[in-house]
Amino acid sequence: MASRRLNQDLPVIARFEVRHRNYLAPDGSIIRPLPAFASDAKLLIALYRAMVLLRVFDRKAVALQRTGRLGTYAVSLGQEAVSVGTAGAMREEDVLLPSYRDNGALLWRGVKLEEILLFWGGDERGNCFSGPLHDFPFCVPVGSQAPHAAGVAYAFRLRKEPRVAVCLFGDGATSKGDVYEAMNFAGVHKLPVVFVATNNQWAISVPLRLQTGSETLAQKAIAAGFTGEQVDGNDVVAMRAAAEEAIAAARGGEGPHFIEAVTYRLGDHTTSDDASRYRSVDEVQAHWKEEPIARLRAYLVGQKMWGKADEERLATECHDRVEAAVERYLATARRRPETMFDHLYADLPEVYAAQRRELAGEHDA
Amino acid sequence: MASRRLNQDLPVIARFEVRHRNYLAPDGSIIRPLPAFASDAKLLIALYRAMVLLRVFDRKAVALQRTGRLGTYAVSLGQEAVSVGTAGAMREEDVLLPSYRDNGALLWRGVKLEEILLFWGGDERGNCFSGPLHDFPFCVPVGSQAPHAAGVAYAFRLRKEPRVAVCLFGDGATSKGDVYEAMNFAGVHKLPVVFVATNNQWAISVPLRLQTGSETLAQKAIAAGFTGEQVDGNDVVAMRAAAEEAIAAARGGEGPHFIEAVTYRLGDHTTSDDASRYRSVDEVQAHWKEEPIARLRAYLVGQKMWGKADEERLATECHDRVEAAVERYLATARRRPETMFDHLYADLPEVYAAQRRELAGEHDA
Amino acid sequence: MPEVTLVEAVNLALGRAMEDDPDVVVLGEDVGVNGGVFRATAGLQKRFGAERVLDTPLAELLISGLCVGMAAQGLKPVGEIQFMGFIYPCLDQLVNHASRMRNRTQGRLTCPMVLRTPHGAGIRAPEHHSESTEAMLAHIPGLRVVIPSSPERAYGLLLAAIRDPDPVVFLEPTRLYRAAKGEVQDDGEALPLDRAFVLREGRDITLIGWGAALKETMAAAEALSAEGIAAEVIDLATLKPYDERTVLGSIAKTGRCVIVHEAAHTGGFGAEIAAFIAERGLSSLLAPVTRVTGYDTVIPMARLEQYYMPSVERIVAGARRVCQFS
Amino acid sequence: MPEVTLVEAVNLALGRAMEDDPDVVVLGEDVGVNGGVFRATAGLQKRFGAERVLDTPLAELLISGLCVGMAAQGLKPVGEIQFMGFIYPCLDQLVNHASRMRNRTQGRLTCPMVLRTPHGAGIRAPEHHSESTEAMLAHIPGLRVVIPSSPERAYGLLLAAIRDPDPVVFLEPTRLYRAAKGEVQDDGEALPLDRAFVLREGRDITLIGWGAALKETMAAAEALSAEGIAAEVIDLATLKPYDERTVLGSIAKTGRCVIVHEAAHTGGFGAEIAAFIAERGLSSLLAPVTRVTGYDTVIPMARLEQYYMPSVERIVAGARRVCQFS
Ligand SMILES: Cc1ncc(C[n+]2csc(CCOP(=O)(O)OP(=O)(O)O)c2C)c(N)n1
Ligand SMILES: Cc1ncc(C[n+]2csc(CCOP(=O)(O)OP(=O)(O)O)c2C)c(N)n1
Ligand SMILES: [Mg+2]
Ligand SMILES: [Mg+2]
């Protein structure tokens, strides 16, 4: 470009770079020396199990939606490694600020399957979950939870608590001013917060190239004055390692970090979407070769940490867990209509209490 | 930082740099070969005259405010080179989107002094100015004009017009999501728009280090996928050169560019502000050594392009022009109260026309 | 005449406007290849190209701000906000720029833009997909706020909104997108932007509503007629500026009024209509103007949303109370 | 008791709240060293440190979003928006998060935040420094909206707002910041957040207002009394939830009512009060409830703003009309 050419003689006053992290190739082979935690077979298997459970759960949730027993639902198909790998690196006392697609992170944190179903079934009680009480619920308005993450991290700083806020959002969210404002603030105060962008290449039907002109999402952190890194988001080892380092650094007072997790949304955006309208089967097929579960399985099997019998046992186990959760979900008693007022204010003002009584009366007969 | 250390072995996939542009040192000496236009003495003198006029005008405007004949006013003291240098590089058909402090740009574009006074005197007619009819008025909500600039540039693209949108805002504005969203969009479509951030180090009382953690503002363009450059904003030659190159590149289809103009706000934020509450006289004094008018004068005088007699003539001329404009401003007839309805809609709906009649009636007696 | 759904009528109007005027540009999230999450822009990108039917990044503030910039350059942008729950980042642009550009510059720059968004609840969608905060918008001077309740009105009012030289927020009742069907002639005929529509005549009571709530309101009128109460039903259609004359005329006839809307009660736009009638129509009034609305609580997610929205029963009960008042 | 201005009362309340509760944090643009552009936070950073009195970057959405995050962690953030004209980027956070966090999580996470901002016109400031769009806020379920009109109420209500376990938007009448003076005991006593204040008793007509407009409303009451009309003046003070009982009680006594606010007429919060009275107080009403408000146009810049705002004359004329009605 002319402007670049013309100013080529000017002195450079700042330089930045973005690195890429991956350990496992799509076929499960090792690209570079694995991080320390990867020698812990139990841990790797736990990550594997979490991803498989998520996939089984997703499939069931879609079936429930298709049969009218669940509302709109967003699957994680193909991108299970991102939320599982990230949450896996958090401590209980850290705070998770998830997006609506981060079921994997919530499950890892201890939220129950039936609670997630309850939320997507249209019941607020699903957000009053058994994961860490301080974790945030699913955030539907894209990117709007990023300022919360900065506020949470600021609270940690103020109270000198060695905790970290971890905020997950999508590639689409990186176009929102909220996310930029939050990152910029985190950069000013070097807050203990890690931003993880799940770059699944699509925001519903909008491909990444219409979302941003930047070569990577990781470089967006440069604007906020901290580091960004691109990670193979289909490699759960890389996700977990990147999140672990970033969280440890944040906890250690070294400030925020941004992780771009490159993956691919193999499914429809949600059950309301039909992705065949805007992308080709070929494109999707190609990405199936890179998906995270087969990749980790290949590695585990190659290392003799995992076998056919394990796989079968896991399948049964996931199936049973999910079915049991679905039963509990379906058996959950309905709330009475007037309970819609019960958590509006700590103390419902009398003027609205009258409305509550009216509503209760209507449905008493 | 640990996170940086730990990932040092990972491959770099993207590199970025920020360059710095200056030609004239504070004492007017030459730092590097001047751009071509600088051999045009008339042009340099025109830039000089515009900056001096602006300073004289500002002084008068403050005096008017202090004596109750003008509302809140924002001077450009110390940063005259930014708006003058930028506007100086624009073509008539380009569109300017200024901030509230960009009087220098408006004046260069042909807006009358009395029109600017009218605006700051609290009369909307000041915005119906004689500059290019398509230019935007002063923007008060910080940064909110950036999306307009992107929209204007998109209109140029759509209509295949070789025009450029030029958007000016402050360092504070770079913290606003609006600005980021607009830049990101401009990056996607490689729109013909140039963003110029006047980094005067302060947003009212908030110093740059509390505004952002980024080493430069120029690097913020990296997040949007285009180039940013840092310019000595007290060197009008550098400002003009940077703007000229960026505007030419944008016109040539090479996309957006971001200019960080480093300068210093030597005056109070506005006439409502008292900067002594939050910064030291010493700091301000130090920056007086770098201010743009003395700098260009030193160069011009050194080059024998300018002398004492020119200076005196210019002072008288500016004084006279400003005084004449003030007289016209003060003589401008008041609008009738009910005219507040006259440009609300193209056709005032009858329901509001009734209010207009009521208001007119009240003030008829 | 062909029968189309409300969302198809929107699509027809957009196509017609783009056909007629090369300055019309459609922009928003997923409006391009995907044709909008509700298919309101289906086929438009194919017909008019990706420059005129533009998928924006995911940024609502941006969408509204782009519209302001484009409009100042003489384009006629039609921005789409995917759900009304995501319109709030646009408010700064709507209040501080779109609605003021003409006044601020005394006519030098104008803002002929339209911002379309689905409105209202009842489709069992996730959080933030059920908003009806039209009252916030209808309070902004310089804006027009329009909400159709049938395919015909969607077509005619949207055309009018796009042709209007000032900014218009166009709310589309999500619940009626496919449920409302009607004959629409794609003849480019616009409807006026300051007129209410009398959907049903009656002399005992006036029911005023807008958007999807008119479905229950019409059903209520039917139920009332079985009880011998002849209800007049008015679709306000344009909330700003609203048609005072039609409202007052009806009240003069009936002397009784119920206003129906989905939005929360306190500070809903029903308050404006009720206050207006109570002031200017007091002499005709035989009973207090009553509002049947959403409750003053956050609209619940799918399981309870039906109890939040004004039901036929609540409207009938309200109307009955008003009719019994003496 | 010491006499202080309204803005000094705000400052006292902030200082007291921070003293009493280490969880109270003040944040906003220029609130630190500078002490706020109106000096509302003067001296606080010195007393409580830069971590608890925090100059944020220039980003209003951020300020409100930070408050939500901090509040969820149990802090009690008090954010400042420098002028109400810049509050619109916060609406997304207020509507979609602050007001919903408790309900969304069924009480697991809460949002005890306060967002303070100067409100109203009349200080001859530039564009966007004269907003009074309280109606938009008072429509949001889950929020409280408060606006004091004297130093005493500023002190007591702000303390209450900060202590309240739910989100409160606290509007401060800019025009009264220095003009209103009164005795304030810095004793940490809060005032209730759901009560209107009767500023003047009278039996002929009720004048209801809030914020700076009460200045002209009180003057109008004085002028009316010279004509033999005894006006009762109510400072609504808390708009959401508002004190229905005090309003109805007064109407029961006077039978006549004028509502006064600076905001544009259509969809202003006066509509809600008028609609409420017309519905629940109709039997007591001797005349239509009238609203004396700003006009339905963009509030003009300094030269014409005085003609926009409700003047004593307009209030008196409105009250006279209402009193003459029969
Ligand atoms: C602010 C906002 N605008 C629009 C939507 C509607 N919407 C839901 S998801 C989505 C796409 C999000 O894309 P991305 O951030 O990449 O996340 P992904 O769905 O791919 O996980 C859109 C536009 C929303 N939820 N919030
Ligand atoms: C959105 C918004 N928030 C707050 C303000 C009040 N305000 C006016 S100027 C200003 C500081 C702007 O700083 P900067 O962007 O650096 O521009 P400068 O004044 O230094 O030219 C602030 C906070 C505003 N005008 N707009
Ligand atoms: Mg995505
Ligand atoms: Mg600045």
Image (cartoon, coloured by chain):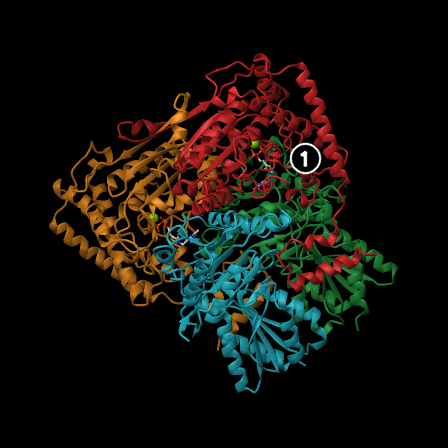
Chain colours: A orange, B red, C cyan, D green
Q: Quadrant of the C terminus of chain B?
A: bottom right
Relative to A333, does residue C25 appear above or below in the rendering? above
**B299 or C218: which is nearer to us?**
B299
**x and y percent of residue D300 in the render?**
68, 49
Snapshot quadrant of residue D3: top right
Whether disc 1's CB lies below 8 Å from ligand 2 is answered no
Q: Quadrant of the N terminus of chain B?
A: top left
Snapshot quadrant of residue A37: top left
**x and y percent of residue C36 in the render?**
38, 58
Look at mark 1 in the image and give the residue it sits on. Answer: B113
The chain under label 1 reads B
How many C-alpha atoms fall within 10 Å of the one at disc 1: few (<14), some, or many (≥20)?
many
What residue type is disc 1 on?
Answer: Leu
Relative to A245, does residue B284 appear above or below in the rendering? above
**x and y percent of residue A250 in the render?**
39, 34
Q: Is residue A327 visible?
A: no
